Image (cartoon, helix red, strand yellow):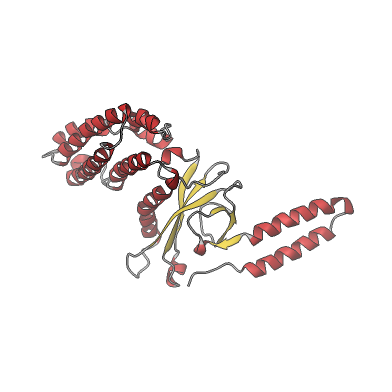
Amino acid sequence: MAIRAPHRSLRGISAVVALLAIGAVGCSDVSEAVDSAKDGAKKVARQRSVFSLDVGDCYNPNGKAEGTAYSVEIVPCDEAHEGQVVGEFAIDEGDEYPGDDGVSTIADNRCPVEAQKYSPDTWALPEGAALFYYTPTKESWATGDRAVSCTYTSEKGKLNGSLATAKSLKPEQATYLEGSNAVYEALWANQPEKDTVEDDLAGYKAQAKAVATALDTHVKGLDGIEGTEVGKLRATLTKAAGNWKKAANAADADTFYLAYDPAFTDIDPNKSVAARKELGLATTVPADEAEVWAG
């Protein structure tokens, strides 16, 4: 069973603390103490177990963003807040607890995909918003907990408003983002563990094949979208797909490198800025992506 926070007892404690605070101050400070007590009571009333979070919930963590947590403060999304739940899924990789690292790996792989269903355009996310997640612990796993809640949490400052943008997208915007997101997901999700092609040619070829397949699908989706800049991007990505296919079929490391260099260059996010502008999407390349291609 999911563990739930003892809301009633917490409210009782809050009321006692509030009464003690009011009794300890002079008459001129009573109003301020009452306001403070009301704020505290409201925060307690908004507490919810992390085991019962829903997609769309906006919240403030109780304490640090990382570490073990049992409850958070749920707030209306139009109030300043630190995080929002943007996806969820259940771990179904067997009955045995995968271990802390295993759970983190599963969340690392699944949460970006789930989050993009809710907020497809990662370029439009507020600065400082980063992907975090609530996962089962060994103890909660033993009670049947398998849920992972994927969240965007502000590492600096507060978030304002909801990050739910999927339903507001135009068809051509949604088509573009679906294809583009799939390309970069194929790139990063299939990243070989070895640092050099010579040490894992098969792994790098498998990655290249995955990216080429995603690019073919993306280009096909762009065929149905009008626009001069979209057309230019489609031509660039068609060429990129060809080079990724050459890399996927390389007989040796040298041949792979010859195809990989132009293939990687042609999916530089900066090359999509003009098409994004034409489609009415965000045009500022996220800092972490810009850094990869700048290097």
On the picture, is 235 further left or further right than 84? left
Identify the image quadrant of residue 89: bottom left
Q: Residue 117: x, y in percent?
A: 39, 50
In percent of the image, x 43 and y 49: which residue is there? Answer: 118
Number of numbered discs on residues: 0
Q: Residue 61: x, y in percent?
A: 57, 54
Q: Is residue 62 visible?
A: no
Considering every residue shown, the one lying at the far left of the view is: 251
> In the depicted view, which residue is nearer to us: 224 or 52?
224
For residue 293, above or below residue 135: above
> In the depicted view, which residue is nearer to us: 101 or 157?
157
- Which corner quadrant holds the C terminus? top left
Considering every residue shown, the one lying at the far right of the view is: 27
Identify the image quadrant of residue 103: bottom left
On the picture, is 18 further left or further right than 59? right
For residue 46, above or below residue 140: above
Q: Residue 24: x, y in percent?
A: 84, 58
Q: Residue 158: x, y in percent?
A: 57, 43
Q: Is residue 211 visible?
A: yes
Identify the image quadrant of residue 10: bottom right
